Image: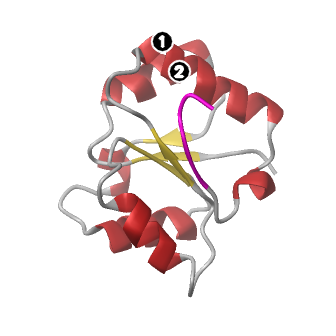
């Protein structure tokens, strides 16, 4: 199964736009489309899981803790943490590479930071 992404509300939306501009067939849902603004981390993780989407976020302070708790009682499609200092073009390339060469099953219950 192909990887699908979910942008967190804190993710720089230019990353989503740049990724989709370079590879329009990627399934990368915006936080706005999923109405994630104002939701707690647990709710965001749950919505991403229900949609079968890897959560892409800048939040390296609270998401890892909530993710660890989340996967003790529920399966997650995974989380990618994007440091804010990384250039948008590099992040976009990494996301396209992940989408092109990995399967969704490889990311289940995993949390990784970019660059890989």
The x, y position of residue 83, in whole percent, is: 38, 32
Residue 43 vs 83, above or below: the answer is below
Give left or right: position of 38 versus 5.
Answer: left
State the SS at label 2. Answer: helix
Residue occupied by mark 2: 92
Question: Which mark is drawn over residue 36?
Answer: none
Q: Estimate the spatial distance between the alpha carbons at disc 2 and disc 1, rounded to whole Å.
A: 5 Å
Residue drawn at (33%, 22%), measured in percent from left and top? 85
Give left or right: position of 68 versus 110.
Answer: left
Question: Which of the pair 27/115 is nearer the observer?
Answer: 115
Circles 2, 1 touching at the beta carbon (< 8 Å): yes
**Residue 87 painted magenta:** no
User: Residue 48: in sight, yes or no?
Assistant: yes
Residue drawn at (60%, 18%), measured in percent from left and top? 93
Rendering quarter of residue 73: bottom right
Residue occupied by mark 1: 89
Give left or right: position of 90 versus 65.
Answer: right
The magenta stretch spans which residues? 111-116
Residue drawn at (58%, 82%), measured in percent from left and top? 74
State the SS at label 1. Answer: helix
Rendering quarter of residue 38: bottom left
The x, y position of residue 77, in whole percent, is: 63, 61
């Amino acid at each position: 199964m192909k990887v699908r992404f979910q942008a967190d509300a804190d993710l720089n939306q230019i990353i989503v736009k740049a990724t989709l501009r370079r590879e329009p067939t990627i399934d990368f849902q915006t936080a706005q489309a999923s109405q994630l603004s104002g939701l707690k981390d647990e709710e965001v993780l749950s919505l991403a899981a229900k949609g079968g989407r890897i959560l892409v976020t800048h939040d390296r302070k609270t998401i890892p803790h909530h993710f660890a708790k989340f996967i003790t009682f529920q399966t997650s499609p995974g989380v990618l943490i994007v440091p804010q200092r990384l250039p948008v073009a590099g992040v976009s390339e990494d996301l396209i590479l992940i989408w092109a060469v990995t399967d969704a099953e490889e990311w289940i219950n995993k949390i990784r930071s970019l660059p890989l």
